[in-house]
Image: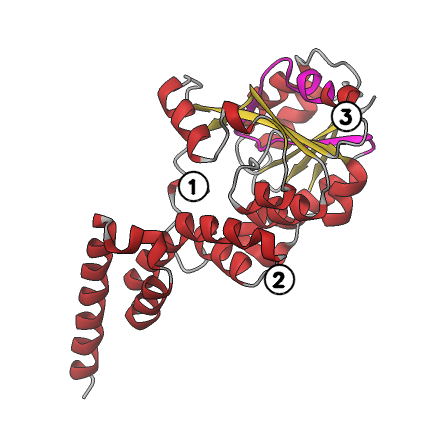
Amino acid sequence: MLVSICIPTCDRPELLELALASCLAQTHAPIQIVVGDDSRNDATQTMMRTRYGNDSRIHYVRNTPPLGQGLNVASLFTRAEGDKILLLHDDDLLEHDAIESLLGLWQRHPDLEIAFGDQYVIDIHGAVDLEQSRAGNIAFYRTKAAEGLQKAPGRTGLVSMFPNNGWLANADLVKRVNYKAQFGSGCDFAFGVEVCLAASKIYYLKRYVSSYRVTPGAISQTTGASMNSAAVEAYRIVHGLRLARELEPARRVAYKRMVPIVVSTLSRHDEPVKSLKLALMHLHAYNYGLSPRFYYHMLLIGKSMLHRKRGRLANT
C-alpha cells in the first residue's frame, strides 16, 4: 500500500535533510514523499536538487510566492497519491518502523481511519529527553490505559491527544477535512480537532513512532507571544464549535489547557477586562482558585489595568 509522507518546509534545509533520511529509512517500502518548500532563499532547492534529484520517491515543489503553513500543507495533501497520508514537519523525525507499526493496525481494524502513537521530545541536536518525552505524552493523555480504539474519536482532537504530526490516516478523510489557512498558527490544532470529529474509528498505539524537535522558533515555545498565537487561535476554534452533548466534557478539558495561556496573553497585550472575564468564566481552569497560577494572572491583569489607566491620564 502506497503511503504519502507530506513535509512542509521553510528555510531549514539541514533539518529537512534529517527528516527525509528518517522517511527513506522506513521499513515499509512503498512510500511517496511530497515536499512543499516555502523558503525565502535557494538553499533548500539546491540541496533537494543535488541530493535527491534522481530519487523517484520524492516529489519536491518550490512555492513561489510562499503559501504559508496552512495552504502549503493543503497543497501537499492535494498532491499526495497514496491511500494513506502521514504528515511530518521538516524539523521532526519518524522512527524507522513508524509507518509499518501504524499501518499494521488496519489489518486488525479494516475500517480504521486514523492511527497515531507517542512522540519523543528531542533537542536541536537530536538528543532524546526521555523524561520530557514521558511527561509530554502523559500531559496529552497518551497513556497505556488509553491505548486502543478511542471510544469518543472527537475527544481525541479536542484534548490535544492527537499529535500535530506523525499520524497516519486515510487519504480521502485527510483531503476532505484539509488544512485551512484562516486558522493561522492554530491550523495544526484546527485540523486535529476537525479530522477527529469527522472520524468514526481512531486508534492510539502506545509506542513511540515519531520525534518532536524543540527548536528556538517552535510555535509551542512561543504560545503566548502574540494575539495571533497558537493558543489564542485554539481557544477561538474550541469556543466556536457546536458539539454533541457528550463532547462538552472534552471542551472543558481543552479550556483547562488553553485558557490560562490566553488570559496571560490578553493581559500582556493591554486587554485586562477581557482577560479578567475569561478567567472568571473558566474558573475550573484554575482549580476554582486553588491554583497559584490564578493569583499570578490576577496580578498581571492588575498591572495591565494600571498601565491602561496611566496611558489614559497621559493622553488627557
Q: Residue at x 81, y 27 (%)?
A: 110
Point out the tag, 2 or 3, that comes first from the N-terminus: 3
Where is mark 3, residue-wise? 109
| Residue type for callout 2 | Arg
**Residue 183's quadrant in the figure?**
bottom right
Q: Nearer the viewer, residue 230 or 281?
A: 281
Q: Nearer the viewer, residue 180 or 105?
A: 105
Please provide percent x and percent y for residue 186.
53, 51
CA gap between label 1 and label 2 equals 26 Å
Q: Which residue is mark 1?
A: 220
Residue that mark 2 sits on: 242
Give the magenta-colored segment's residue range. 81-104
| Secondary structure state at the residue bearing disc 2 | loop
Q: Residue at x 21, y 71 (%)?
A: 305
For marks 1 and 2, the one nearer the N-term is 1
**How many residues crowd around disc 2 within 10 Å: few (fewer than 14), some, or many (20 or more)?**
few
